[in-house]
Amino acid sequence: MKKKPLLFLVSLLTVLPVSAQSAKDLLEKAENAFVSAPGIEAQFSLRYVNQGGGTQNGKIALKNKKFKLSTEGTTTWFDGKTQWTYVEANDEVNVSEPDDSELEAINPYAFISFYKKGYKLKNGSATTANGHQVYEVDMLAEKKSQDIWQVVLMLDKATYQPVQIKIRQKNDQWFILNVTSFAKKSLADSFFSFKKSDAPNAEIIDLR
């Protein structure tokens, strides 16, 4: 249950600096900037507010439809077609080819345009987050049946990079992600594919 909101949250790290505009314009600029970027790397901490608490640290690399996500004990690669998930505790790698509906939940690129489907957008009031002056952008679900009810992005007023992201699910569970570093970086396509040397002794489980 934790992986789905985590991947959704980290997918929103692709917001890049743009001038202050409406919420819709801001997100459209972010989508265009992400597609044209040679790659993005970010580190974060994720706090589960009312699901027993706890904090999870991780990092993500993104390039167009591809991503590599590392959290405590788990690493996931996606090369645009095939997904590999390495679970350290079991020393195994699960291989799959997610369909479109699965990519809605696991592929960060799919969520770059998430705001276009069933969400109302609005600019929140300027405030502070993690010691930064920020703009607040809200995404509100049009239907209560949607899994994600609300997403709140806190964007640094000077750089428009994300400082904090909040998400509320339909069960009223909140997750808060704090970005600790964010940078554009040129990444080779091979970076997003699992290699045997990444886990030489792991059992490979092909679920395709």
Image (cartoon, helix red, strand yellow):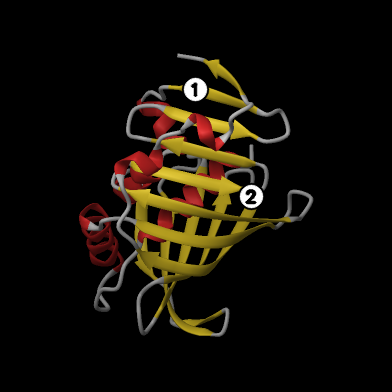
Q: Secondary structure at mark 2?
A: loop
Q: Secondary structure at mark 1?
A: strand
Task: Estimate how packed mark 2 is, as few (under 14), some (14 to 19) or many (20 or more) residues with alpha carbons within 10 Å.
Answer: few
**Which numbered disc, 2 or 1, marks the residue that appears first in the sequence?**
1
Instruction: Say what amino acid the circle numbered 2 marks.
Output: Asp
- Tell me where residue 146 appears, x and y as whole percent: 48, 39
Q: Nearer the viewer, residue 104 or 194?
A: 194
* Marker disc for residue 130: none
Residue 65, relative to residue 49: is it above or below? Answer: above
- Tell me where residue 123 appears, x and y as whole percent: 37, 71
Residue assigned mark 1: 95
Residue 76, relative to residue 131: is it above or below? Answer: above
Residue ID at (46%, 33%) = 194
Look at the image and tell me whether residue 73 can be seen.
yes
Disc 2 to disc 1, C-alpha distance? 32 Å
Can you tell which quarter of the image residue 82 is in?
top left
Q: 19 left or right of 197? A: left
Q: 184 left or right of 84? A: left
* Marker disc for residue 172: 2
Residue ID at (54%, 37%) = 198
Instruction: Say what amino acid the circle numbered 1 marks.
Output: Val
Q: 198 left or right of 111? A: right
- Tell me where residue 195 appears, x and y as whole percent: 46, 32
Q: Quadrant of the N terminus?
A: top right
- Tell me where residue 127 appears, x and y as whole percent: 49, 83
Residue ID at (38%, 82%) = 157
